[in-house]
Image (cartoon, helix red, strand yellow):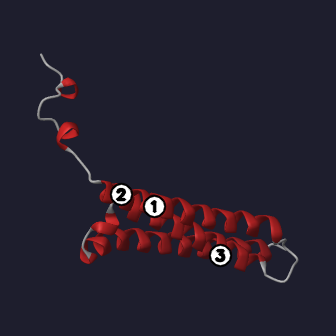
Amino acid sequence: MERDDLIVNDSYAVNATHTEEEGKKIRKKLYMVTVLLTLITVVEVFMGVAFKRNETFTWEVIKLGFIVLTVVKAAYIVLVFMHLGEERRNLKYVILLPYALFILYLIFIGLREGISVHDAQNIFK
């Protein structure tokens, strides 16, 4: 019995060749992804260090900023590393729209339950 990963003849790894120009484009894309994700992370860390609860921004705005930056970072990772950015627009919507609706649903449920718990606690005071 012969293993597939040990076969060298006519395998994809042997036949896959890239020109130097294609390699430069791939490296440029990887550098851009690294820089963008690093910048978003630096902004998130800066927000966590710089803003306190009693300063100019309300705590809800800061939390919303964290959520937005995290979702942007996650969407960019999906688009680049899962190669969804290279697909047709309709396929992107078919894949991303259910997740977006699910996230909105979770936010709605979290807010609704938080309000209900807050109201229930105020009844017994």
| Residue under the image location 46 percent in, 66 percent down | 76
Residue 77, numbered circle: 1
Q: Which residue is mark 3?
A: 64
For the N terminus, give its image quadrant.
top left
User: For residue 64, what is the image quadrant?
Assistant: bottom right
| Residue under the image location 69 percent in, 70 percent down | 117
Q: Position of residue 104 (x, y in %)?
A: 49, 75
Mark whose residue sits in front, 3 or 2:
2
Mark 3, Cα crowd under 10 Å, few <14 / some 14-19 / many 20+, is: few
Q: Is residue 13 above or below residue 118?
A: above
Q: Looking at the image, which is closer to me, 24 or 10?
A: 24
Q: CA distance from mark 1 to mark 2?
A: 7 Å
- Under mark 3, the amino acid is Leu
- Under mark 2, the amino acid is Met
Q: Looking at the image, which is closer to me, 122 or 6?
A: 6
Circle nearer the N terminus (3, 2): 3
Q: CA distance from mark 3 to mark 2?
A: 26 Å
Circle nearer the N terminus (1, 2): 1
Q: Looking at the image, which is closer to me, 60 or 25?
A: 25
Q: Position of residue 102 (x, y in %)?
A: 44, 69
Mark 2, Cα crowd under 10 Å, few <14 / some 14-19 / many 20+, is: few
Q: Are marks 1 and 2 in contact (CB under 8 Å)?
A: yes
For the C terminus, give its image quadrant.
bottom right
Q: Which residue is mark 2?
A: 82
Mark whose residue sits in front, 3 or 1:
1
Does residue 95 appear to the left or right of 52 in the view shown? Answer: left
Does residue 5 appear to the left or right of 47 in the view shown? Answer: left
